[in-house]
Image: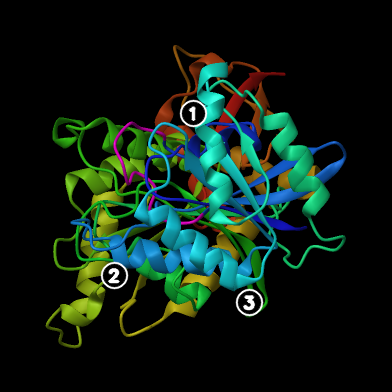
Amino acid sequence: MSLVAIVGRPNVGKSTLFNRLVGMRQAIVDETAGVTRDRHYGKCEWCGTTFSVVDTGGYTSNSEDVFEAEIRKQVVMAIEEADLILFMTEAATGITDYDDEIADILRRSGKPVVVAVNKVDTGAKMFDSYQFYSLGLGDVWSISAANGGGTGDLLDEIVRKLPAEGGTDIDEHPELPHIAIVGRPNVGKSSLTNALLGTDRNIVTPVAGTTRDSIATYYNKFGHEFMLVDTAGMRKKAKVHEDLEFYSVMRSIRAIEHSDICILMIDAQTGMEAQDMSIFQLIIRNLKGCIIVVNKWDLIEKDNKTLKQYETSLRERLAPFNDVPIIFTSVVRKQRLLDVLDAAAKVYANYTKKIPTSRLNEEMLPVTEDFPPPAWKGKYVKIKYATQLPTRNPKFAFFCNLPQYIKDPYRRFIENKLREKFDFTGCPMQIFFRQK
């Protein structure tokens, strides 16, 4: 598919237009300038033509924003990989120094450019848009990204200017496993994403909360193929004061809900804190596969027992569901990063595993006969039949004569036996007892 990059100075409405083009509220929109930092990909379809859209941060120079240089680098990378540039400006403010600077970069890039003048909400504001012809980038299209005015004509022009064959393979890939990297702020989620991709895909700084949106990227290396989703760090509700961070946390929670596997990153120096446990419980409640990555392991003083003791104490905290892979890494030193990918692939295989009913009964019925559920008020529970339910994640139904008398301890016993016989490492499991 062809790729269209939306570029412009801060607060001209790039993310608002991006959300309108992809048909969902994917990028965070706020009145504050400089909300978007990383590149954000989506898919747009217009008149039978499908193309990818990339939203970028606002291009600035000599500002007080500590992320300015990194954002500018992301914008330049987006321009380089795009087939067409959608240059967004704003009617009310007119042409600024930043607009001139961006126009100069676009003229030198040699890429096709479409100029959109945003916030033209009334007919009277239409006259403010004509000044943008002086940029020398061709026709100017007046739009209102907030209410959709003029976006149809703009899309017609984009489709007309797109090359016949797109130069990129960016796609949503809905059939691929979605792996979300989650955790508290500043544990190294974006660094891990960049290290796996081998490129500066996401902005990384020592400032906690650098990433705001959930950024999905197609990954195809070392025999692994999936969508990798970097998320914003999640803090306790009491510590989330501003709207932007609230939206970021909500996007991270939504990323967990829409993922198949979650990589929970924790800081080796602080260990598994209460907030890490809250995120872990959120993953389990949503029945997602889980891998725990202990980052910054190079900063820990070690002897020959440190790793084993650390892992044992970690599994004690995770109980009762502690059947998860734990990998000790240092993203900065690129230690054991491929182990993370291999573990993700293995957990996904377990997550989507389907056990034939005949084999399930062959293995589990002898267990239920040798260790039946405890009798209740003189009544004996007999399990006759078991089957795996046709759901995406592991769920099993056991049919018996008196399901109401089976308690949680026996349910956990059955779950442990299933894990022992069929290997569901990293996958939460649900077991139902039904009337036969």
Q: Nearer the viewer, mark 1 or mark 3?
A: 1
Q: Quadrant of the C terminus?
A: top right
**Residue 424 percent coordinates (x, y):** 56, 54
**Would residue 228 appear left or right of 177 to someone viewing this image?**
left
Residue ID for mark 2: 295
Q: Secondary structure at mark 1?
A: loop
Earlier-in-chain disc, 1 versus 3: 1
Identity of the amino acid at label 3?
Lys
Splitting the image into 4 quarters, where does residue 162 fall? bottom right
Q: Nearer the viewer, residue 212 or 311?
A: 212
Task: Name the residue nearer the viewer: 211 or 262.
Answer: 211
Residue 404, magenta (yes or no): no
Quadrant in the picture for residue 397:
top right
Whether residues under marks 2 and 1 lie with C-beta atoms below 8 angstroms apart, the answer is no
Q: Amino acid at mark 1?
A: Lys
- The residue to which callout 3 is attached is 221
Tell me if residue 260 can be seen: no
Residue 34 in the magenta stretch? The answer is: yes
How busy is the neighbourhood of tag 2: few (under 14 within 10 Å), some, or many (20 plus)? many
Above or below 35: residue 196: below
Residue for point 42% across, 29% down: 408
